[in-house]
Amino acid sequence: MSETEGIINTKATGKTEETHSTPIELRHVTKSYASGMDRVTALDTVDFCVNAGEVVAVIGPSGSGKSTMLNILGLLDEPTEGSILLHDEPATGLSPIEKTTARRETIGFVFQDFHLIPTLSAVGNVRLPTAFLPGDATARAEDLLTRVGLGDRLRHTPDELSGGQKQRVAIARSLINEPDVLLADEPTGNLDSETGAAVLEEIRAIADEGVSVVAVTHDDLVREYTDRTVELVDGVLTDAS
């Protein structure tokens, strides 16, 4: 399969239970930091949710709070005020172990810089989030890589892959634990426009299989593949669709 060909089905259907709750939600979230004698507000009373199968782009200038919002959605940071909910259940104030479990069960991450382990093959990188879980995820990793068009690159290391192929490996890795929510940080930031469009088609296909996607981006192309766009300016979130 070429770099520009899309995929048909990116999420395996191992989960049999369906839920109609909101996969992830922020309620009245404020995040502030001490800066010398002052206090900087990165997020200001943000309300946000994403529905199952919805793709939402988060745009805004540098320093507007986008990364902070993504970190809070990913349970990597705690809000100063407000609450995080996963499937309508509180996820604020969890212990580190509880956060790790919640992320593993609910959230997948795709990063701008891929964050692949250079000494591991494509399969090894995709399997990595399952390293401390029972069972062998090799077959699932191979299936996911095949679904994203890398069935002929299973044993290749990152230095043998193009930028678009590395991002496809990262997408497959993000799906290994069958997440309900995919958080993407500048998913096309290191890609040319053609390859970026191919990756966005795959992200759109993921959403069509029921996964919620939140993509932080500066790339106007991303908005062509989303259901809704919100904008962060000075920590204030508004609808930009």
Image: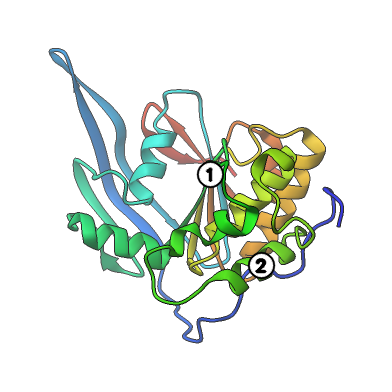
Mark 1 lies on a secondary structure that is loop
Q: Residues within 10 Å of mark 1 (few under 14, many from 20)?
A: some
Q: Which quadrant holds the C terminus? A: top right
What is the C-alpha distance between the residues marked 1 and 2?
Answer: 17 Å
- Is disc 1 in contact with disc 2, using a CB cutoff of under 8 Å? no
Q: Which quadrant holds the N terminus? A: bottom right
* Residue on which the image places disc 2: 142
The colouring scheme, among rainbow, by chain, secondary structure or one colour, is: rainbow
Three-letter code for the amino acid on which mark 2 is drawn:
Glu
Q: Residue at x 72, y 47 (%)?
A: 165
Measured as percent of width and height from the top left, residue 65 is found at 39, 32
**Viewer-closest of 16 and 54:** 16
Task: Name the image quarter holding residue 37.
Answer: top left
Q: Residue at x 69, y 56 (%)?
A: 155
* 12 relative to 72 in the view: left or right: right
Measured as percent of width and height from the top left, residue 156 is found at 70, 50
Determine whether 21 is above or below 149 in the image. below
Determine whether 54 is above or below 185 in the image. below
Three-letter code for the amino acid on which mark 1 is drawn:
Ile
Measured as percent of width and height from the top left, residue 76 is found at 32, 46
